[in-house]
Image (cartoon, helix red, strand yellow):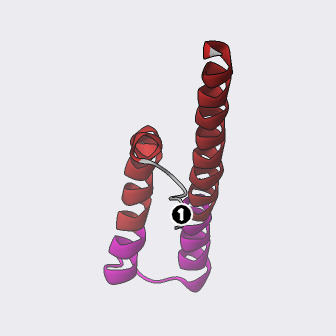
Amino acid sequence: MTEKVFDRETLLDLTVNFIPLGILIFFIGAFALFAPWGVDPLISSLQFTIVGGTAVLLIILTYYAGKAISTAEMEMEADHGHDAE
């Protein structure tokens, strides 16, 4: 049986990154569906690159932060297990 990558506590710690990610995804969708300032290929591509790049970087950061949190929790549990002996 495979173990989950992130447990419930780690996911709760990472919710601080899920909220801004949701906001970025909302704006990507909103600007894709509605063009409030018109469509200029240069400006629109620059806008999507900035917002999309920020979203991708936040996803990568969230993943590595989750791995670091999980590793730290496992090490702390292992250290406490050795202290009891």
- Kindly identify the residue that appears in the image at 60 percent across and 64 percent down: 56
Residue 57 visible, this orientation: yes
Q: Position of residue 73 (x, y in %)?
A: 58, 33
Task: Determine whether 48 is above or below 67 in the image.
Answer: below
Instruction: Judge left or right: residue 33 versus residue 70.
Output: left
Q: Position of residue 54 (x, y in %)?
A: 59, 58
Along the line of sight, the residue nearer the viewer: 64 or 30 = 64
- Kindly identify the residue that appears in the image at 36 percent across and 78 percent down: 35
Q: Position of residue 80 (x, y in %)?
A: 61, 20
Tell me the magenta residue range: 28-55
The residue labelled by disc 1 is: 51
Dividing the picture into quadrants, the one containing residue 23 is bottom left
Q: Main secondary structure of the magenta part?
A: helix
Along the line of sight, the residue nearer the viewer: 30 or 25 = 25
The question of residue 32 being in magenta is answered with yes
Name the quadrant of the C terminus.
top right
Task: Determine whether 5 is above or below 66 in the image.
Answer: below
Along the line of sight, the residue nearer the viewer: 29 or 47 = 29
Task: Determine whether 10 is above or below 4 in the image.
Answer: above
Residue 36 visible, this orientation: no
Secondary structure of the residue carrying tag 1 is helix
Local crowd at mark 1 within 10 Å, few (<14), some, or many (≥20)?
Answer: some
Residue type highlighted by circle 1: Val
- Kindly identify the residue that appears in the image at 62 percent across and 36 percent down: 74
